[in-house]
Amino acid sequence: GGGGGGGACPRAGETDVLIDNLPGIPDGISRAPDGGFWLALVAPLSPLPRHLAPWPRLRTLLSHLLPWVAPFAVGSWGAVVKLDERGRPVEALYDPDGSHVATVSAATEVGGRLFLGNLGGRGVSVLQL
């Protein structure tokens, strides 16, 4: 048992998949006012991560370079996915050519508006929901 009144967490050290088969690489996730979540997708999926599976350090390095590499590797693209409280997708918003927002790294809903942070931009985009 653990002292300190906190009790032991029966699943400490375990991980679960919240959502899979996403159309892009997930980045930031935030709680929505309705109890669901907004998940930012920073770039569309590419076969490259599968090919790099044997080299986890190289994958990690490339993930840190993604903001600078993504526009050249995959073009401009922006997306967020709305998840319900159980992690099931209920809505997806895309900017397929990245003309308004691309490399979305964060999404926060406040007062009927969705604020989108991005890795490559100079500001925060706002979308009326």
Image: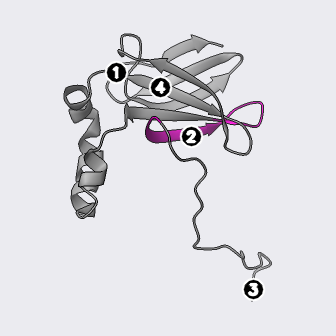
Q: Residue at x 70, y 16 (%)?
A: 112
Does label 1 or label 2 sit earlier along the sequence? 2
Q: Tell me the CA gap for discs 2 and 3.
A: 32 Å
Mark 4 residue element: strand
The residue lying furthest to the right in this view is: 5
Where is mark 1, residue-wise? 121
- The type of residue carrying mark 3 is Gly
- The type of residue carrying mark 1 is Gly
Q: Nearer the viewer, residue 116 or 52?
A: 52
Magenta range is 23-37
Kindly check if marks 3 and 4 are in contact, taking CB atoms under 8 A apart as contact: no
The residue lying furthest to the bottom in this view is: 1
* Residue 83 x %, y %: 66, 36
Does label 2 or label 3 sit earlier along the sequence? 3
Kindly check if marks 3 and 1 are in contact, taking CB atoms under 8 A apart as contact: no
Q: Look at discs 3 and 4 and give the one toward the viewer.
A: 4
Where is mark 3, residue-wise? 3
Does label 2 or label 4 sit earlier along the sequence? 2
Does label 3 or label 1 sit earlier along the sequence? 3
* Residue 39 x %, y %: 55, 36
* Mark 1 surroundings within 10 Å by alpha-carbon count, few (fewer than 14), some (14 through 19), many (20 or more): few
Where is mark 4, residue-wise? 79
* Residue 1 x %, y %: 75, 89
State which quadrant residue 110 falls in.
Answer: top right
Q: Which residue is drawn at 24% across and 64% down?
A: 54
